[in-house]
Amino acid sequence: MSRSERCFWIACYPDLPRPIGGVKQMHRLAEAIKACGHRAVLVQESADFHPGWFQSKVSTIARADWITGTQFNPQTDVVIVAETFLPMIPKLAPGVPKVLFNQNGAYSFGVQGKPLLSPQKVLAMYRHQELRQIWCVSEHDRRLLSLGFGLHTNRVRRIVNGLETEHLKPSGRKKRQVVYMPRKNNADAEVVMALLQQQPWFRDWSLLPIRNCSHAEVVQALQQSLMFLSFGHPEGFGLPVAEALACGCAVVGYSGLGGRELFAFARGYGLGIEVAFGDWLGFVDGVRQLDQHLRQRQDDLLHQLQAMSDEVRQRYSALAMQTSVAAAIRQLDEVP
């Protein structure tokens, strides 16, 4: 294998069957790396495991076999880890260059109130000598990592979060239906749903929670719905919001900070309202405003939703992801 042909080992364990967008994007990253002419292998607990709720074509290896049976070449091998693997960087394939695929900058400091390391140790680990690059998925996190963490701009690369644009698109038929995912901040979602059901103007709308669905079922729900409510916070990008926009949904809710670019994009079409974290009344006001807007634009509404979808699907396409990954890989040897 020449130096121009690398092997990227992507740590993706434990094996979790429940729908987690970050796991799906690990698969999409592997596909993008392969499309760039390199080898990409997902390291899992079991080589035969697949989450099952989405489709992908990736190579896999069992973690035990990877640890005991792999002869690493620091000149061509690269290990990719998530931000939640930060404490493990010195232990995984010592001496092999690392890339941190950071899908949520906030998770560097812990998930759901459980810290990984002290803030000082987190920042120190981002400067580990084997960590060659950090790949992030939003402009907010790029600025957080380069300006907030104080990392050299050459070490922080923005990767486009690619969407399955062949499936994520409007179907042409919409219901007065509000769809949402209560997996994150479910308590907020329950309060907002109760408040909405108290509003007289909301009586001709229906509510649809998305729970433990396959990706095909999620797409169908988004395609049928006029509006998506976002409860994700914090977010490194806001994949559900991006998928909702691609399916032609107006959006209201939390940007999670990383999704600010998505809400700004939707706002340009008059179809997005960002709500401050914890502002339940903001959800009600946002839905009411979009309800009025959608009623006033009924004649050209489907055209407007389609135009928004076309632009977001182009901006976050698999090809755009592949192009950004290729640029990041080319820069690996240039990192100071």
Image (spheres, rainbow, N blue to C red):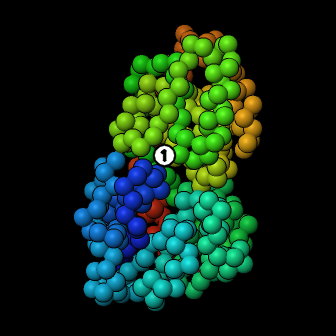
Quadrant of the frame with the C terminus: bottom right
The residue shown at (55%, 41%) is 182
Question: Quadrant of residue 125 in the image?
Answer: bottom right
Residue at figure coordinates x 68%, y 26% from the top left: 195
Rate crowding at label 1 as few (under 14), some (14 to 19) or many (20 or more) other CA atoms within 10 Å: some
Say what secondary structure mark 1 lies in: loop
Q: Residue furthest left?
A: 48
Image quarter in which the N terminus is found:
bottom left
Q: Nearer the viewer, residue 182 or 266?
A: 182
Q: What residue did someone put label 1 on?
A: 316
Name the spot of residue 277 as percent of width and height, x first: 72, 44
Q: Is residue 288 left or right of residue 18?
A: right
Is residue 44 depicted above or below 194 in this figure? below
The answer to which image quadrant residue 23 occupies is bottom left
Residue at point 71%, 70% (across, down): 149
Image position of 295 with respect to 117: above or below = above
Total marks shown come to: 1
Name the residue: 43% across, 76% down: 79
Classify 130 as above or below 9: below
- Choose top left, top right, bottom left or bottom right for residue 119: bottom right
Find residue 106 and report its horizontal and vertical position in percent: 65, 61
* One can see residue 311 in this view: no
Position of residue 125 relative to residue 113, above or below, is: below
Instruction: Left or right? Give the position of 37 relative to 259.
Output: left
Task: Give the residue type that dot 1 points to.
Answer: Tyr
Residue 103 lies, in percent from the top left, at 54, 59
Q: Position of residue 300 (x, y in %)?
A: 54, 14
Asked if residue 57 shows in the view, the reply is yes
